[in-house]
Amino acid sequence: MVSWIGNIAKISLPTPFAVGDVNVYIIKGDVLTLIDAGVKTKEAWESFTYQLSQLGYTPNDIEQVILTHHHPDHVGLLEWLPQEIKIFGHQYCKPYLSFDEAFFSAHDQFYLTLFHEFGVHGEFAQLLKNWKSPLRFSASRSLTDIINEGDHIPGFEDWNILETLGHAQSHLSFYREKDGTMISGDHILAKISSNPLLEPPLSKKSERPKPQLQYNASLKKLFDYDISIAFTGHGAEVKDVHALVERRLQRQHDRAMQVREMIKEKALTTFEICQRLFPAVYQKELGLTLSETTAQLDFLLSKEAIKKVVNEEGIAYFCA
C-alpha cells in the first residue's frame, strides 16, 4: 500500500533492468508534481496507475513532471502521460527525449571512436546497437522547460535545484532546506554505488566528459547541506547521507588503486583492464563495465598516478 511521508509518496515501478525497481515520487502541494516517470513498459504503467489510484489520483491529475535525469528508467512513461503536463529537466535531457537526429549521429560516432581507442574487440555496429538498446524503453516527448541549479519551479518553490552530474550528464537533485529532505535520483543510492556512465558531450566539439571526476565533485557538494533524508531513485531512503558519501569516495579510491596495481607490470588497454575487472559480465554489460573502467582510469590520470600512451593506431595503453 503506497502511503504519504509528509507530502511525499514513493511509487516503486518494475523495470527490465538488472538494477530492479525504480522509484518515482508524487509531491503534494500547490501543484501536484511527479518526480521522474519510470520505464515505458505495460507492467510499469499498470503499476503506476494502480498505486496512483491508492493515493486518490489519476494521471490526469498530475500537473507537472520534474526529471532527475534522462535515463530510460526515469523518463519512459512520459510518453503515456497527458500532453498538457509541463515537463522540467536539464538541457541534456532534450536531445534524448526528442530523439534529435544530429545529436544521435554525433552520439554514435562518439562511441565508435571510444571503442577503437579502448581497444575493444568485436563488431562495432552490433556493440553500438547493444549499447543503445535500453533507449527503446525511453520516451519520445519534448521538455517544456529547461532547468538548472539556482532556478525555481512554480509550485515547487520550497525546493532548491542542485546540479549533481556524474551518473548522468543531466543529473539534478532537489533539496528542501526547511526539513533537510532531498530527492536524490540516482546520485545517492542506499545499497549500491551509482555507475558514472560514459556519455557524449552536448556539442561534438567539446571534450569528453569525465563522469567519475564529476561524480566525486557532486558527492562532496552534499557536505554543504544538512540532509535529514534522501529519497532515492532505486531502493530505500538514506538517512545518514554524509557518512554514505564518505564510504562511496573511499571505496572508489580503493577500486582505482586496484586498477593501478593491475597495470604496474604491463601496459593494458581500457578493454583489457575491463576484462580483468569484470570477467563474468563484461560481454553482457559492456556499457556499464567500460564506463566503470574508464572512471577509475580518469581518476588515476587526474592524480597523475598512471600514464596514458596512444600508439600509432590510436589505441590507448595505460601503465603505472
Image: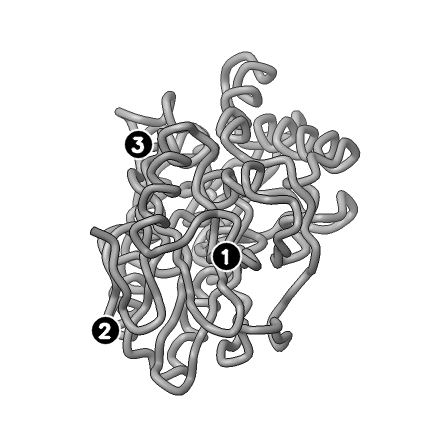
Give coordinates of residue 30: x percent, y percent.
52, 74
Given this view, does label 3 or label 2 mark the residue nearer the observer? 2
Question: How far is mark 3 from mark 2, CA to CA?
Answer: 30 Å
Residue name at image x 55 percent, y 14 percent? 126
State left or right for residue 34 relative to residue 9: right
- Choose between 70 and 24: the one closer to the eye: 24
Residue name at image x 32 percent, y 36 percent? 14
Question: How far is mark 1 from mark 3, CA to CA?
Answer: 29 Å
In this rendering, the answer to whether 169 lies above or below 164 is above
Given this view, does label 1 or label 2 mark the residue nearer the observer? 1
State left or right for residue 113 relative to residue 180: right
Snapshot colouring:
one colour
Residue under label 2, please give it.
Answer: 240
Crowding at mark 1 (Cα within 10 Å: few <14, some 14-19, many 20+): many
Q: In the rendered structure, which amino acid carries the disc numbered 1?
A: Thr
Give coordinates of residue 118: x percent, y percent.
53, 31
Which element type, helix, strand or loop, lies under badge 1?
loop
Q: Does the CB distance between marks 1 and 2 fall below 8 Å?
A: no
The picture quadrant where one finds residue 228 is bottom left
The picture quadrant where one finds residue 311 is top right
